[in-house]
Amino acid sequence: MKRFLGLITMLVALTVTTKAQEYMAMNYTFAKGQQFEMEQKSRSETYMTVNDVVQRTTRDYNNIISIEATEVNPGKTILTFRYKELKFNFNAKNQNIFVDAKVANDKEPFQAGLKNILDKPFTVEIQSTGIVNKVDGLDNILDNAAAAFSALKKNEQEAYMKLMKDQFGTDAFRSWLEQLLIMYPAHGIKTGTQWEENVPMRGGLIGSIDLYWNLQTWDTQTAKIGGTSKIKTDKVQMLTLEDGIKATAEISGSTSSNYLVERSTGLPSICVQTTEMNGNYTYKADKAKKIRKDLKVPIKVVTNASYKIKQMK
């Protein structure tokens, strides 16, 4: 009996070892007409200390986006995205903006602007490896949505348009999409394989993001993949911040991600991410902005996000 149990144990161990040594291919594979729905929930908190006064800004997203494979070619696919639900809560400097794009709010102009984004198609061209080639049509949608601000004063129009583009424009969208989608290597991978990619920071900050992934476990249908990233700004590049303040940024941070991937498409059915960034802005002296000399402004950003993608058709 002991010999029999010992043989079974050896066979199980051999099977596990063999499985761990097997290679598999991972990439994004779509059929024209496939449809998906993505639910995005995230909260970002930013803390800036200006002249010993802490300024806190929060941004909450609760969005549902439809995705359709509208053009499939060898090595790349064009995916059409549409916001189906869009809820956004912004709180900064004692100003709170809460918007549900589907719920009318005559007292909040931003609601009308985001309502104009709903159900408007824009496209993403993605390689089979997960590299995003381009995002088309999104900024045009936002430009047209800005008509909702036409009755406001010019400075108010500019402020709302900047807020909308900073949160939902092409650079912002592409930035989080590049950190959400795993970029797969061209070669096969096995349990324990690690690989990496680099993308530029997009939007307000200038710098680069080093992305790393590792294959933890897999079976015929799914794969569990862990991810990390190292974020670093270019500390000599000049930026224009809110209120037209000129500054440089010396900020670094990291992201930790966990994915459950559907092998049939390569898309993550579940992704959970945590990002923390720390560093300093250096506001440049500007008499017009009442900044008498260069001013160091410590900053901390913490973001927690979760995504769910399910196939609808």
Image (spheres, rainbow, N blue to C red):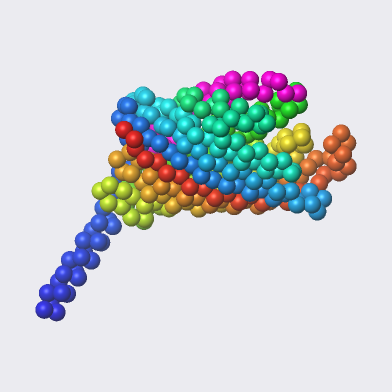
* Frontmost residue, 64 versus 46: 64
Query: Does 230 sit above or below residue 134?
Result: below
Residue at position x 31%, y 52% in the image: 218
The answer to whether residue 136 is magenta is yes
Q: Residue 311: x percent and y percent?
A: 34, 37
Magenta stretch: give its range.
124-153
Residue at position x 77%, y 35% in the image: 243
Which image quadrant: the N terminus? bottom left
Residue at position x 88%, y 36% in the image: 287
* Frontmost residue, 16 versus 69: 69
Q: Residue 268: x percent and y percent?
A: 39, 44
Which image quadrant: the C terminus? top left
Q: Is residue 31 visible?
A: yes
Query: Does 288 sit above or below residue 280?
Result: above
Which quadrant of the structure image shows residue 107?
top right
The answer to whether residue 76 is magenta is no
Q: Is residue 133 visible?
A: no
Q: In screen coordinates, is 307 left or right of 75?
A: right
Query: Does 146 sit above or below residue 191?
Result: above
Q: Residue 295: x percent and y percent?
A: 81, 46
Q: Farthest residue toward the bottom?
A: 2
